[in-house]
Image (cartoon, rainbow, N blue to C red):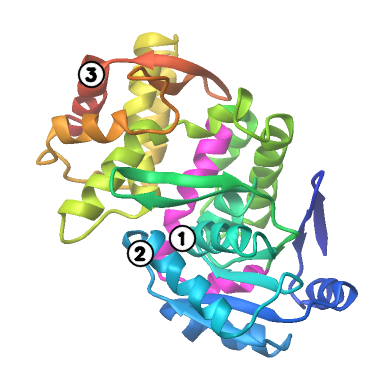
Amino acid sequence: MNCIQLQDYNIVFDNNFEELKSFLAINQYTKKIVLVDENTKQYCLPILEKNISIDVIIEIKSGEENKNITTCELIWKALIDETVDRNAVFINLGGGVIGDMGGFAASCYKPGIDFIQLPTIVLSQVDSSIGGKLGIDFKYGKNLIGLFQNPVLVFIYNDFLKTLEKRQYINGFAEILKHALIFNSTQWEQLKEIDIFNDDISALMYQSLLIKKNVVEEDPKEKGLRKILNFGHTIGHAIEAYSIEHTAHPLLHGEAIAIGMIAEAYLSHQKTDLSENELADIVQLILQYFPKQDIASYPIENIIQLMLMDKKNKGNDIQAALLTSIGACAYNISIDEEDIIDGINFYINL
């Protein structure tokens, strides 16, 4: 078992559930509630039920389009119907949607019960389950309603990854690439050599988690350094939101962030001195895992409007995190509509 200790909670790597069973026994929770979607109910819940007793199972629909206040209301009603008190524990079994929304719902109930993150995909294991930033989408943009609240435990069971289809597995690799780009040039070089489908990536995932740990502990409320974690997300989130709302086959989070990272790497070359060679290196590796998407039909004005709703902005000033080199990132860099158009066109014209 490996363990990463943060100030308020631990991230535990354990493939026999002993640490989770011990944690639950010590805390003597009145009820154990598990939040699942139709996918984790089928593939992951049976594994969990073999190892711990569960009192309440709440099922919601999968997908970013369901990460909203309406679904939260369903969760809260289920908790009330089951007479769940403040001494219960809420276990989020799933990806980023389950973790974000489940943590938010638990933190607002009565008001606030302990919650545990059990991430089941690469994306949530290395990124969204860590750092206590919780939120739901509102009709004007992603994660506009939310709060900061840490889980009491993050439990990582790597065998959950065996249940993933290829597209979902690759999806999470975008955040591993991002962590290396903003913080660790040595890891970026390692990523260029690994075969993520055939090699053991647990060491890379562990290192990626350490990067996020260092950043969020220095800046837990995103007042400064933590903003570098938004690299690729300023443009990427807007593209993701548009694809969910207006296309028949929405992009996954990692796919949209891969587009955002390429566009923002180009802006980094234009505005914060990222070298041309480094830009080419970034584009090549990202496209290796995330083949180019056809976003030429996405109206730029819609993307810009969505970006104006971004929670990172100051007034109407769109703020981005841009690379100064591979492994180093600046934040609070203002970009305008012309920059956004240039960055997106750079991707479209690759």
Mark 2: few/some/many CA within 10 Å (<14, 14-19, 20+):
some
Residue 3 percent coordinates (x, y): 81, 56
Q: CA–CA distance between discs 2 and 3?
A: 30 Å
Which residue of the protein is positioned furthest toward the left in this rendering? 297
Q: The residue under label 2 is which amino acid type?
A: Asn
- Marked residue nearer the N-terminal end (2 or 3): 2
Q: Which residue is mark 3?
A: 337
The numbered disc on residue 97 is 1
The answer to the question of whether label 2 and label 1 lie on touching residues, with beta carbons closer than 8 A, is yes
Q: Which residue is mark 2?
A: 66
* Membership of 91 in magenta stretch: no
Is residue 321 or residue 290 the one in the foreground?
Answer: 321
Q: Which mark is residue 272?
A: none
Do the residues under discs 3 and 1 have CB atoms within 8 angstroms? no
Q: Provide the residue span drawn in magenta.
A: 157-181
Quarter containing the C terminus: top left
> Against 168, is 211 above or below?
above
Give residue 321's position: percent from left, percent from top: 47, 23
Q: Quadrant of the N terminus?
A: bottom right
Between 317 and 50, the one nearer to me in the picture: 317
In this rendering, position of residue 319 left or right of residue 259: right
Secondary element at image label 1? helix
Q: Residue furthest right?
A: 26
Find out whether residue 176 is within the magenta segment. Answer: yes
Camera-near label (2 vs 1) is 2
The amino acid type found where label 3 is placed reads: Glu
Kindly report which numbered mark, 2 or 3, lies closer to the viewer in this rendering. 2
* Element under disc 3: helix
For marks 3 and 1 on the same chain, the one whose residue lies earlier in the sequence: 1
